[in-house]
Image (spheres, rainbow, N blue to C red):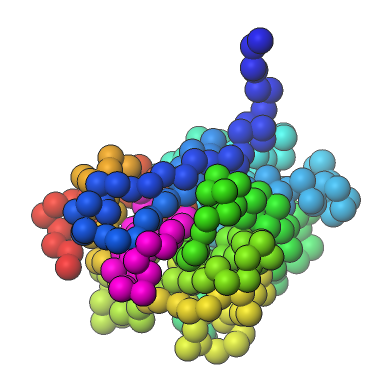
Amino acid sequence: MSKIYHSIMELVGHTPLLEIHGFEKKHNLKAKILVKLEYYNPNQSVKDRIALAMIEDGEKSGKLKKDDTIIELTSGNTGIGLAAIAAAKGYPFRVYIQDQVSRERFQVIHAFGGETVKVTEVPEIVESMEKYGADFVECVKALEKAVQGQKVWFADQTRNSANPEIHFRTTGPEIWEDTDGNVDIFVANVGTGGTLSGTGNFLKSKNPDIQVIGIQPTPDSFQTPENPEQEEITGVHPFENVEERFIPANLDRNVYDDWYEVHTNQAYAAAREVAKTDGILIGASSGAAIHVALQLAEKPENAGKTIVAVLPDTGLRYLSTNMFNEDFQVE
């Protein structure tokens, strides 16, 4: 019997879990590391899940109308996912995107017919950045002011409840089913908080003893006037040791048991390593997840346990950065 799909919407989710045997062997690990390869989504990132969920929720609620322009503020992957779904459904799309992200992200969004606007081209966002720094949550609030009166529908991944809900309904159950419930530790980055919150809450609903671990960048992983060339872990944002207003609404502060900080160089090093040990090409945030999974796997108390880490996207979106530039030294 033939199996023919009729829309990219049908291809979202059901991404594979892979045990990274080569990486485990190299580090002589006594714990098992399973990685969820979200680059198997149709547009190569975990954000395909929320892009589809938010748009369909907007349609169902009646807030998204057929002649609206879909807009979003993003570091790239959510914009790519939304651009693709918008194209498939016939909506115009405009993304407000951070200036320093890799040029591949701009190119992919344009390929889908989307419009890109750099955040530094929006006066309200510039004003917010001068006051609060490049904080994602505050930039979202500034964008709301900037588009008032326009015929747009703002997806708003930081506050849209369809974000964590889709991970509760899909990502969590996929991990549980594919491991037959044999999960001890779950690791995920925090950007909007949706992946960690939705997946973590589902897994804890099945087994409250599962440890949920969040990841944020180290403070020196961000560009500053003193270090303007610093490359960042795109899409990953601080959620601990920051003011409450900087924490995305979609992050459930009660779901995680612990959190780790990762420097960009550590994320790059882990991504380079796993490419050579296991043949998977992953992005910077995925490298951060691998780095933390390794730290957990090396702890004597975790011997024999199963660690599941979400790898958000593909390394193909980082080829214009120094991530895979062997002349760029990383620790």
Residue at 66 percent across and 62 percent down: it is 206
Q: Nearer the viewer, residue 157 or 331?
A: 331
Residues rendered magenta in the picture: 282-310
In the image, taking residue 9 as reference, residue 128 lies left or right, namely: left
Location of residue 101 with respect to 282 vertically, above or below = below
Specify the farthest residue to the right. Answer: 62
- On whether residue 111 falls in the magenta region, the answer is no
Above or below, 320 against 143 in this view is above
**Looking at this view, is 163 or 258 the one in front?**
258
The residue under the point 49% across, 84% down is: 240
Residue 255 at x, y percent in the picture: 61, 74
Q: Nearer the viewer, residue 196 or 64?
A: 196
Horizontal arrangement in the rendering, residue 88 relative to residue 220 (left or right) = right
Residue found 17% across the figure and 64% down from its top: 330
In this orientation, does residue 40 appear?
A: yes
> Where is residue 126 shown, x and y percent of the image?
52, 74
- Quadrant where the N terminus sits is top right
Q: Quadrant of the C terminus?
A: bottom left
Residue 182 position, x and y percent, is 52, 55
